[in-house]
Image (cartoon, helix red, strand yellow):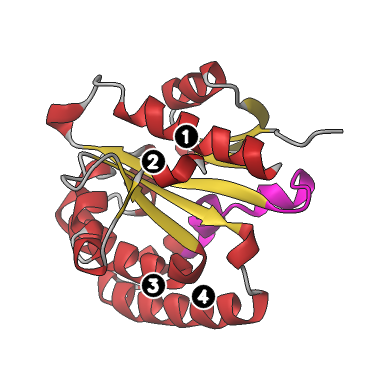
């Protein structure tokens, strides 16, 4: 299997992920929109990622280029998905997160709820066919960029999709990342726009189904 070529992150290594993700996505258009207050953004993001990783853990693969985890890829495998259990965890996550952001004030809570849908992969219901992989997140340490690690790992995921006859989906919030994925064989299926905040969600699929 192609994914066997990648390093599987250990439970202890996963404990460091919320901080790593918060640092990597601090200036992401999505999180700048969700948490516009720069003084509070990092704390909110770390808390969010802790809850989010708990929610997706049973269906997720936490992969890296090596034990050093220079590049990390989080992939959701629909074959592991249990809808009932997932929604239980999702409800817990949302309740914890709402309680957390209450200290930011009612105005910010309403603002965050208004934009919450931009965090979702709901667009997939119009395109997914049977089982699929979802490239949920990918980060590379600043000093290790442009080394080809991310491309190699995505190609491994695409190869796994080809072997298993499964689509690979992704959503990103920067045009340059969408163009990069298109070069690797993804097709832009939809662009969801939040005009108020000039925020774009680019929805892509690498279709591997054989007719």
Task: Please tell me whether mark 2 sits on a helix, a strand or a loop.
Answer: helix
Near mark 2 (Cα within 10 A), the count class, few <14, some 14-19 or many ≥20, is: few
Q: Which residue is mark 4?
A: 90
Measure the alpha-carbon separation of dots 1 and 3: 25 Å
Measure the alpha-carbon separation of dots 4 and 3: 9 Å
Upstream in sequence: badge 2 or badge 1:
2
Q: In the image, is residue 17 part of the stretch drawn in magenta?
A: no
Q: Which residue is mark 2?
A: 5
Q: Position of residue 141 (x, y in %)?
A: 18, 36
Q: Is residue 44 left or right of residue 52?
A: left
Q: Is residue 138 left or right of residue 119?
A: left
Upstream in sequence: badge 1 or badge 3:
3
Q: Which residue is mark 3?
A: 54
Quadrant of res 149: top left
Q: Which residues are magenta?
A: 113-131
The answer to whether residue 13 shows anywhere in this view is: yes
Q: Position of residue 102 (x, y in %)?
A: 32, 77
Marks 2 and 1 close (CB-CB < 8 Å)? yes
Q: Is residue 92 above or below residue 40?
A: below
Q: Which residue is mark 1?
A: 156
Foreground tag (4 vs 1):
1
Q: Position of residue 79 (x, y in %)?
A: 64, 62
Measure the alpha-carbon separation of dots 4 and 2: 31 Å
């Amino acid at each position: 299997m192609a994914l066997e070529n990648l390093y599987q992150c250990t439970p202890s290594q996963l404990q460091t992920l919320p901080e790593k993700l918060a640092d990597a996505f601090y200036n992401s258009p999505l999180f700048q929109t969700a948490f516009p207050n720069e003084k509070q953004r990092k704390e909110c993001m770390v808390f969010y990622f802790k809850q989010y990783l708990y929610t997706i853990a049973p269906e997720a693969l936490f992969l890296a280029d090596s034990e050093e985890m220079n590049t990390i890829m989080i992939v959701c495998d629909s074959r592991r998905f249990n809808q009932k259990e997932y929604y239980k965890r999702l409800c817990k996550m949302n309740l914890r997160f709402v309680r957390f952001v209450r200290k930011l004030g009612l105005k910010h809570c309403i603002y965050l709820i208004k934009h919450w849908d931009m965090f979702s992969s709901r667009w997939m219901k119009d395109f997914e066919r049977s089982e699929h992989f979802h490239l949920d997140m990918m980060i590379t340490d600043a000093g290790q960029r442009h080394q080809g690690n991310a491309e190699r790992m995505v190609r491994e995921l695409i190869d796994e999709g080809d072997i298993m006859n499964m689509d690979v989906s992704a959503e990103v919030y920067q045009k340059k990342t969408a163009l990069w994925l298109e070069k690797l064989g993804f097709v832009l299926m939809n662009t969801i726009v939040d005009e108020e905040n000039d925020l774009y969600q680019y929805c892509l699929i690498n279709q591997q189904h054989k007719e």
